[in-house]
Image: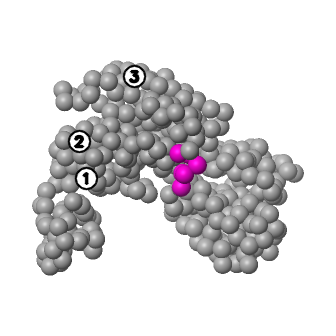
C-alpha cells in the first residue's frame, strides 16, 4: 500500500492524498487518480500521519542539526540496515510534507524509521516532532545555518531542541538522545533533553567527518550491532545527490559535488573531508546565504579551514565570497563575476590528479559548475 500526494505516481490500489500547495490544489487531479485506479484519501496529511505513527511499533529516529543531517541519516541507514528493516527519509524530504510522507512509507514490518527534520525558524521542529514522536534523536551540531532568521546560535540550539517533547502515555518509557558533545550549546541540548526524560548518549570527534562516524558507532552499538557490522554498513554508504558525491573524470581528476546547499558548518565538514584526499586540492566556493551580520566573518573564516585542508587554489563567485581576503601564500585565489568565466579558467588550470570540491548555497546553483566541469574535462 502506498500513499502519495503526486497524482503522476499513483498506481492501481495506491492512496492519493489531495494536498494543497501554494501553486496547486491536489483535488484538481482527483479524476486522473481515479482513472488510473488509485483511491482518494481526502485528509489532512500531517494529522493523518500523526495518527498512523501511533500505530507503528518501530523505533523512530529523528535526525536534525545545523549541518550534516542528510549525510548522517544516509550513514545511519547504511549501518542499521545490516541488521534491521529500515525506512528513511529520501534525499532532503525533511519538512512538513516530507516527514509525514516518510512516516506513511513505514509499515508493521518496519523496525527502525529514520526521519530527517529540517527547519527555518522557531516552532517548525516542534511541529514535525509532534507528528513523528521520536523515540530516538540525533542532533549533529549547532552552527550558523539560518542565523539571519533566528538571530543567534542559542536560538538555533533552542529551535533544534524542540525535537524533545514530553512523553505521552502510549510512548516508550525509555527514550534516547545522541548528542554531539563537540558542538556549541551542548549543555543546552542536554538540559532540554533531560527535562523530558531522554537519556543522553554523547558522541564526539576531532573533526566533523569523524563525529559523523562516531555517531554511527554510538547509534549502532545502542541497537545491538557489533563494530564489524557497523564497519560493513559504513562501506555500503551512498550519499544523497549533490552531497559530497565523488565524480571520477578523465586524467584521474575527481570532482566532489557538494552543491545541494552550504552554511559555515557544512563547508567546514566538506573541507575536513577533502583533507583525506591526496592530490592537488581546489575549492570552488559560491556564496553562503542567510547569514545576516555574520556573513563577512563566516566567509572569511573558511580561509583557515581551507589552508588546513591543503587547498592550493580557491575559485570564488558571488557577492559575499568577493569580500574574502587571502593573506597566505599557500593558497592562490581568484574571484569571478560569472560562473561561466570561472569554469573556463578552472578547466584551463586543471591538472591530472586534481581533486575539486564545489560548494555553495542552493540559491547559487553551483551544480551548473559541476555539470560544466564534467562536460569540459575530457
Instruction: Quarter of the image for the C terminus: give it.
Output: bottom right
* Mark before the other along the chain sequence, 1 or 2: 2
Q: Is residue 325 left or right of residue 25?
A: right
Q: Quadrant of residue 287?
A: bottom right
Q: Which residue is mark 1?
A: 104
Cα separation between marks 1 and 2:
10 Å
* Mark before the other along the chain sequence, 3 or 2: 2
Q: Position of residue 40 (x, y in %)?
A: 13, 66
Say above or below: 249 vs 112. Answer: below
Q: Quadrant of residue 293?
A: top right
Q: Is residue 198 left or right of residue 375?
A: left
State the residue at coordinates (35%, 42%): 112
Q: Position of residue 96 (x, y in %)?
A: 30, 51
Residue 172 shows in this picture: yes
Q: Secondary structure at mark 1?
A: helix
**Disc number for residue 56:** 2
**Disc number for residue 199:** 3
Membership of 318 in magenta stretch? no
Cα separation between marks 3 and 2:
22 Å
Q: Position of residue 347 (x, y in %)?
A: 75, 73
Question: Which one is in front, 331 or 269?
Answer: 269
Looking at the rendering, the stretch of residues picked out in magenta corresponds to 233-238
**Disc number for residue 250:** none
**Given this view, does label 1 or label 2 mark the residue nearer the observer?**
2
Amino acid at each position: 500500500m502506498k500513499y502519495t500526494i503526486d497524482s503522476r505516481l499513483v498506481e492501481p490500489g495506491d492512496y492519493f492524498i489531495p494536498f494543497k500547495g501554494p501553486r496547486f490544489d491536489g483535488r484538481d487531479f482527483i479524476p486522473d487518480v481515479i482513472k488510473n485506479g488509485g483511491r482518494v484519501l481526502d485528509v489532512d496529511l500531517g494529522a493523518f500521519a500523526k495518527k498512523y505513527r501511533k500505530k507503528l511499533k518501530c523505533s523512530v529516529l529523528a535526525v536534525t542539526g545545523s549541518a550534516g543531517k542528510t549525510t548522517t541519516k544516509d550513514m545511519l541507514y547504511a549501518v542499521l540496515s545490516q541488521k534491521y528493516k529500515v525506512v528513511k527519509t529520501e534525499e532532503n524530504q525533511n519538512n512538513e510534507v516530507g516527514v509525514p510522507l516518510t512516516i506513511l512509507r513505514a509499515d508493521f514490518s518496519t523496525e527502525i524509521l529514520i526521519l530527517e527534520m529540517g527547519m527555518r525558524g522557531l516552532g517548525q521542529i516542534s511541529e514535525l516532532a509532534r507528528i513523528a514522536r521520536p523515540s530516538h534523536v540525533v542532533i549533529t551540531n549547532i552552527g550558523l545555518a539560518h542565523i539571519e532568521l533566528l538571530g543567534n546560535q542559542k536560538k538555533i540550539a533552542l529551535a533544534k531542541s524542540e525535537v524533545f517533547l514530553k512523553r505521552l502515555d502510549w510512548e516508550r518509557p525509555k527514550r534516547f538522545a545522541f548528542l554531539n558533545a563537540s558542538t556549541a550549546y551542548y549543555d543546552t541540548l542536554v538540559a532540554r533533553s533531560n527535562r523530558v526524560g531522554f537519556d543522553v548518549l554523547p558522541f564526539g570527534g576531532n573533526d566533523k567527518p569523524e563525529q559523523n562516524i562516531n555517531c554511527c558507532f554510538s547509534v549502532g552499538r545502542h541497537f545491538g550491532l557489533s563494530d564489524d557490522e557497523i564497519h560493513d554498513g559504513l562501506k555500503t554508504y551512498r550519499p544523497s545527490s549533490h552531497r559530497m558525491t565523488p565524480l571520477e573524470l578523465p586524467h584521474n581528476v575527481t570532482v566532489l559535488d557538494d552543491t545541494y546547499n552550504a552554511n559555515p558548518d557544512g563547508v567546514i565538514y566538506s573541507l575536513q573531508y577533502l583533507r583525506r584526499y591526496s592530490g592537488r586540492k581546489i575549492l570552488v566556493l559560491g556564496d553562503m546565504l542567510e547569514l545576516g551580520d555574520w556573513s563577512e566573518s563566516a566567509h572569511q573564516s573558511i580561509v583557515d579551514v581551507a589552508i588546513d585542508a591543503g587547498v592550493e587554489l580557491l575559485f570564488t563567485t558571488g557577492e559575499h565570497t568577493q569580500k574574502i581576503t587571502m593573506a597566505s601564500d599557500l593558497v592562490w585565489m581568484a574571484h569571478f563575476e560569472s560562473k561561466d568565466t570561472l569554469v573556463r579558467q578552472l578547466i584551463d588550470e586543471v591538472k591530472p590528479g586534481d581533486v575539486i570540491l564545489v560548494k555553495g548555497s542552493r540559491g547559487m546553483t553551483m551544480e551548473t559548475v559541476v555539470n560544466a566541469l564534467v562536460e569540459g574535462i575530457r
